[in-house]
Each structure stands twice: as C-alpha cells, then as structure tokens.
Amino acid sequence: MLSVQGLQQRSRLLQAIRSFFYGRDYIEVDTPIRLPVLIPESNILPFASEDWFLQTSPELCMKRLLARGCERIFQICHCFRKEEQGRLHQCEFIMLEWYHTGWSYLELMEECELFVCSLAKTLPTFQGFGENGTTLLIDDAVVDLTPPWEYLSVTEAFERYAQRSVEDVLAKDCFDEVLVAEVEPMLGWRKPTFLYDYPTVLGSLARKKPAAPHLAERFELYIGGIELANGFSELADAREQRQRFESEIRTIHANGREGRVPEQFLIDLPQMGECAGIALGVERLFMLLSRRDSLLESVPFDRASL
C-alpha cells in the first residue's frame, strides 16, 4: 500500500501522463469496462461479470472510436485479468493505451521515447531519475534515456541471449518460457530496449510486415529487464482478423473455455485505416520511476488490505 507521499507521487505521474498527450492534441476517452464480448486471446483469462466480462484491455472499444473518425486518442483505465498475481502482475491494474492514425509502429516507438523523456523533465524529483533527467536508476544500474534507444529484433535477441533460433523455440512450443527466462532479463539495462518484429503467430492483432510476412510489426519496450509496453501497427483487414480470431477461439475451446468473435468490432475495423497503438502498464512505470520493488508497493490498496 502507498503512503500519503506515495499517493502524491502517483497523482503527479498521472497528471504528467495526461499533460504529455494533451500537449500533442490527443483526445482522452473513457470507454466501458464491462463488455458482452472481448477480443479472443487464448493466453489471457477474463473475469466474468454476470453474463458479460470485465475488460482485459480497452483496445476493442478504442479502435471502434478510431473507425468513427478519431485520429489521436488515449485512455488511462482499470483492466482485469485472472491468475495474474506477483511482483510484476496484479489481477486489477491500470493501463495507459494510446492510438495514432496514419502511423506505423516505427513512429510509435519514437513517440514512446519522447513520452518517457518528457516524464523525466516533468518529474525530476522522482527517485529513479538521475541528474538532469537523462538517466534512470534501476538497482545498481544506470540506464541512459538519451534517444535513440536500442532497437533489437526478436531474431537477434534470441540468437544473442538464448543461443537458440526463434524457429526452434516456436517448433518446440516454448517461445514464452525462453523469452521470460533467458531474453527478458537481459534487456534494457544500458538503454531502454525495443524488442521488435515478432513472429506473425505471436501478433494476433498486428499487421504483417509487407517485405517479410512471416513477421508482425509488433514491439515491446523493456527497461531494466521489465516489459513496460506492447505496441504494433494495427491490422485493419477484417477478413484476416477474423481468421486470426477463429484460430484463437479454437485454442480457447480446446482449453475448455468459451470464446466468440466480436462481430461489431470486425464490422467497424475497415474504417479504422492505417494506425498504430500501444498499451503501457502504469503501475510498472510508477514502480520503476519511484524505485519501488514490486507492484504491491505501487498501488493504493493491495489484496491483503481489503
């Protein structure tokens, strides 16, 4: 649980986040957290709310707003995922999600750099920032925030840190295990690291790279071995998206759970156009910036206190 001083810090962070996006002409939106159908994701377990569900992400509704004509939107909201509890996971957490039409994941990665650097200038008293706000202190390491940051493809990362190819771990169905155990802990210590160009099978809502369709235009941001954000160039082809959803639903059904296609989302999807979007864990960011050790130390109430 947070002290009064911690609550003040958290409040300042939320204000700084909003100021960044207001200054870049984004619209702050507020979408429902309780929905009749979610984006089918076999690796995420949702909470039921009577015959509906609590959102695992605001992505579905935010993309439908883009299809209505919004060009730049962001949202700070509560999300809910079952069986996620630990140092870096909570069943209920705050997500920052933002979208920019006309962009790909490349422009979004650049804006992500600007976003974190702006926080360093706006929040110089946070314990994590070093002198002049150009570094971030994590454990005994000093992470250089000066752009450009490190860009590392998934293929390069696995060859460098796991000494195994992506094709090998996919064939053995152990990509996530190897990523978490061998690759992630090595990322983002000298500079923040963008891990990019995931295999298409691991980018269910991401657009394929035109020159390399076996890869998805997806990235994750790591600082100090911790994943902070997940973003991509959005897939706007409703037919291809339906096929990916149906593949996910087959896996969901095989695991004994229910899932169905969000039909209204697919109807609206072609009107979204070219777009890039990103989701960032606010409590993880707060944990790093304030030099706390876990998410339990970064929230107003933990489960044990309720």
Image: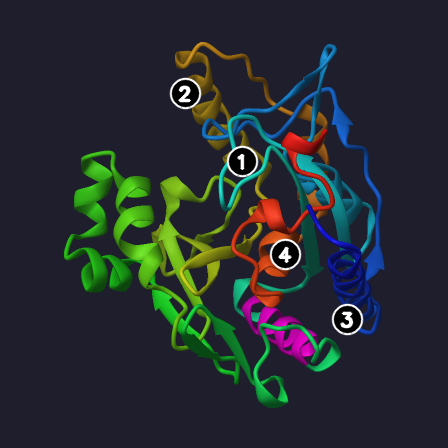
The amino acid beneath tag 3 is Phe
Q: Earlier in the sequence, mark 1 or mark 2?
A: 1
Whether residue 280 is visible here, answered yes or no, is no
In the picture, the quarter occupied by the C terminus is top right
Q: Earlier in the sequence, mark 4 or mark 3?
A: 3
Range of the magenta residues? 108-120
Q: Please indicate whether residue 271 sits to the left or right of residue 86 in the image.
A: right
Q: Which mark is residue 241?
A: 1
Q: Position of residue 292 (x, y in %)?
A: 57, 59
The image shows residue 13, relative to residue 218, as above or below, that is below
In this view, the mark in front (4 or 3) = 3
Q: Position of residue 81 (x, y in %)?
A: 59, 30
In this view, the mark in front (2 or 4) = 2
Cα gap from disc 4 to disc 3, whole angstroms? 23 Å
* Residue at numbered disc 3: 20
* Residue at numbered disc 2: 251
Is 295 magenta? The answer is: no
The image shows residue 212, relative to residue 121, as above or below, that is above
Within-10-Å neighbours for mark 3: few <14, some 14–19, many 20+: some
Q: Earlier in the sequence, mark 4 or mark 1?
A: 1
